[in-house]
Image (spheres, rainbow, N blue to C red):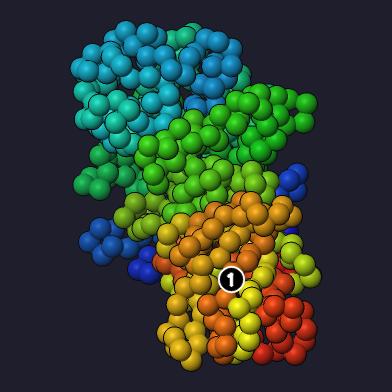
Amino acid sequence: MLPGPLERLVADAEAFLAPSPAHPWYAGAVLLAGRGGTVALHRPIGKAVRYSAYDEATDTGVEFPADRQIAMAEDTVFDLASVSKLFTSILAVQQIERGSLALEERVASYLPDFGGAGKQDVTVRQLLTHTSGFAAWIPLYKEPTREAMLRRLWDEAPTSPPGGVYRYSDLNLISLQLVLEKITGRALDVLLREEITAPLGLHRTRFTPPPSWRPKIAATEDMRQPWSGLDRGLVWGEVHDENAYGFGGVAGHAGVFSCAWDLAVLGRTLLSGGAYGRVRILRPESVKLMFTDFNTDFPGDAHGLGFELYQHWYMGAMATPRTAGHTGFTGTSLVLDPTTDSFLVVLGNSVHPVRSWRSGSAPRVAAADHLARAVPVSAGRDRSAWFSGMAAGTTATLTLPPLRLATGEGRLRCSLWWDTEPETGVLVLEASDEVDPAWLPVPFTTTVAPSGEEAGTPHPAGSVSGWSGRVWHRLHADLADRRGRRVRLRWRYATGAPYVGRGVYVDALRVEDGNRTVFDDSRHGDAARVEAAGWSVSAD
């Protein structure tokens, strides 16, 4: 991994400790990034505990005295919020492996009471992929007892037919918790300890941490109405989520506390096919299933079993069709990219002192962009290639000098590598000449190197966008219609905002006119005539 982008990852993360734009995004964070079996970065920033309360009249945080504030540390424990769903999902897939749970079975076959109010056909898979039809959220915590909370759940009717839409809902994983507890005879916190944390040695991961852990836990919110559903004051060492609190801190959708290192071990386990050292908690085919998109009917909402897939809004440039992860409302996230075998943990206390201070996922995106850049791309021919950069909301052009094509056998050849945000990140090959001075798209064909060009993929619009597999492609563009003209060729890369992919690389640019080579960027004189606006020569 490249040290420069990792250093910038930390610098950008620290910038969000300042107003971003009106308030800090978090009081502090722990950042962990790595690839393969190596942790390349593990850095705490800011404060784990800073504010004693929130002053709504002035929209400011009331700080603890300096000697009572607690700096973030590498082993600071966080309320993971919805990242907890990943643990519940892993426990469910373990039971699928053992034959006690079936992915396409109706939930009501395990929990007969669940089948009321039109939920009789909801399946286990639909709970794991958020396609059950459940409402996004209901205030279960307002019920006086656990039994009343369950009755409210049993009586909750789907807001859309099961399997008809994707709608993220905590109720899915709460329901899955109840299924797991029914079929195993063990409470969810016991399952977590016996099936995941104890085997993997995750000693800082659990539900309901004891009071002795409190000094090492990041504080969350000054919970008061109207911004919270409950009046609890500063929440520190107890679960933040209202419904999880109503369930006593043990819930399928939220409630797990953990640290960055433990999450890295979990991520490494999954990237290694379900094993860590000599311990195996899942079969490789089960991990593959968790990273497989079951929501192809809902473009943009790719989802495996428990894991979200290909989400640029927090995965940034790490996002690929195989990249898996999850976020938590408190400011947490885990991203795993099997393509590059890399992992990123960002744990922030972004609801400290109040949830309204945080907006969007800019720190997560920035960290993921830098980690993606830290994984180098080997040049296709030489030790360097033209690189588009990764700036959002910009246009970069790479323009060749004017070239006269005397024959009807003109053609452009090059090597091309691209990974852009789908649709909003577009690379276009364009040409301009004295007859047609406007820049117009040039159709081309790409072939995954080193296979033959006959099997290539045509791009009649002269453009590419999205994911190309993180492999080099050979490109061929026919320039026969430019015979007798003085032509200019350029690559134009336009990005949207606020997300980008890993960018574009162009190498081995060569323009031929019959048997004559009129441009070759391996020749120093030709390369010096290239006009690069936003592009640069990169060895990485």
Q: Position of residue 59 (x, y in %)?
A: 28, 62
Residue depicted at x 62% and y 85%: 405
User: What is the three-letter code of the residue carrying label 1?
Assistant: Asp
Q: Position of residue 244 (x, y in %)?
A: 37, 30
Which residue matches tag 1?
478
Residue depicted at x 42% and y 37%: 296
Note whether residue 143 is visible. no
Q: Is residue 355 left or right of residue 65?
A: left
Q: Nearer the viewer, residue 351 or 499?
A: 499
Q: Nearer the viewer, residue 249 or 390?
A: 390
Q: Is residue 382 left or right of residue 96?
A: right
Quadrant of the frame with the N terminus = bottom right
Question: How many numbered callouts?
Answer: 1
Residue depicted at x 27% and y 18%: 119
* Helix, strand or loop at mark 1: strand
Res 240 → quadrant: top left
Q: Position of residue 124 (x, y in %)?
A: 41, 20
Position of residue 439 relative to residue 140, above or below, is below
Res 359 → quadrant: bottom left
Q: Nearer the viewer, residue 272 or 237?
A: 272
Residue depicted at x 67% and y 80%: 513
Note whether residue 113 is visible. yes
